Image (tube, rainbow, N blue to C red):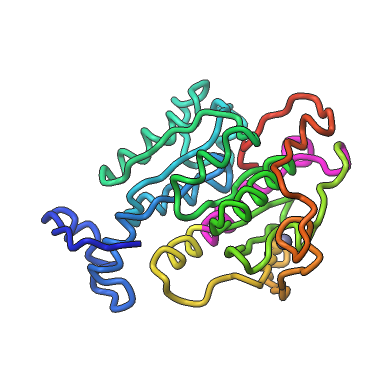
Amino acid sequence: MAVAALPFTEEQIKRYSRHIILPQIGGKGQRKLLQSRVLLVGAGGLGSPSALYLAAAGVGKLGIVDFDVVDLSNLQRQVLHHGHDVGRPKVVSAADTIADINPDVQVVKHQVRLSSENIMDIISDYDVVVDGCDNFPTRYLVNDACVMGKRPNVHGSIFLFEGQATVFLPGQGCYRCLYPEPPPPGMVPSCQEAGVLGVLPGIVGLIQAVETVKIVLGIGRSLTNRLLLFDALAMEFRQVRLKRNPNCPVCGDNPTVTHLIDYEEFCGLPHRDHADGA
Ligand SMILES: [Zn+2]
């Protein structure tokens, strides 16, 4: 990313002063953040905390993909949205909240259902993809598109009282290296069916936000090749080493998945909300 020496306004110097005084960030790093373009897949449980903090940190362009509307049952964990947003599109509610936090942030509302038809066009406008979706068809679609489009994929997922997060950098493995194929439809219940601790996506979504900021700034040691597992009931973090699988169907030496797959249609699942962010 080229960083032009744009002067900060007085307000920006004050707003970002706690970043600017950090030697690892400084004015140069803050400009990188302001010029960065991050796509959030889902404005739900995981996307909410990520969006709030990425906006506050001064990520210049935040794309949000979500075609759902805010439901009262979302407010238990989806902290981007408020009581008066019930019934409004999540991308609209998200944009309003973010505008209040930081007017420097350009929010791009993608109120669409991600598919093999539109995902490459969408991700091509962004430097980093944060996957906060809550369903397997979207997760595999985002994974494959990030591999094919060479975009870092900051992964997070939650279930009941447990969460996991990792980072897939281009050429260094992907979600299919871990789980080559999605489970058959109906085998894994969604959060709607199984429940989830409301605070849990706050932790996991913010781990994703930290990793995203580190990727943009090029600092620290990323979660690449490590899967971080969090158990809220035991209050324990564990790590599992990951490495690229040469037999991976999409990023392996002889890939068999060479075009994007819409698993929902392929599997004939009944219509279900996409990118709800758990
Ligand atoms: Zn892979």
Q: Position of residue 173 (x, y in %)?
A: 68, 66
Q: Where, quadrant-wise, is the C terminus in this rendering?
A: top right
Magenta part of the protein: which range?
Answer: 186-208
Residue under the image location 73 percent in, 36 percent down: 262
Q: How many marks?
A: 0
Image position of 184 with respect to 88: above or below: below
Occupied quadrant, residue 218: bottom left
Does residue 6 belong to the magenta stretch?
no
Q: Position of residue 16 (x, y in %)?
A: 25, 61
Does residue 200 belong to the magenta stretch?
yes
Residue that extends furthest to the top in the rendered view of this protein: 87
Residue under the image location 39 percent in, 67 percent down: 217
Q: Position of residue 235 (x, y in %)?
A: 67, 67
In this rendering, position of residue 36 left or right of residue 90: left
Occupied quadrant, residue 22: bottom left
In this rendering, position of residue 21 left or right of residue 52: left
Give 156 or 3, whichever is nearer the viewer: 3
Residue under the image location 59 percent in, 47 percent down: 132
Ligand 1 visible in quadrant: bottom right
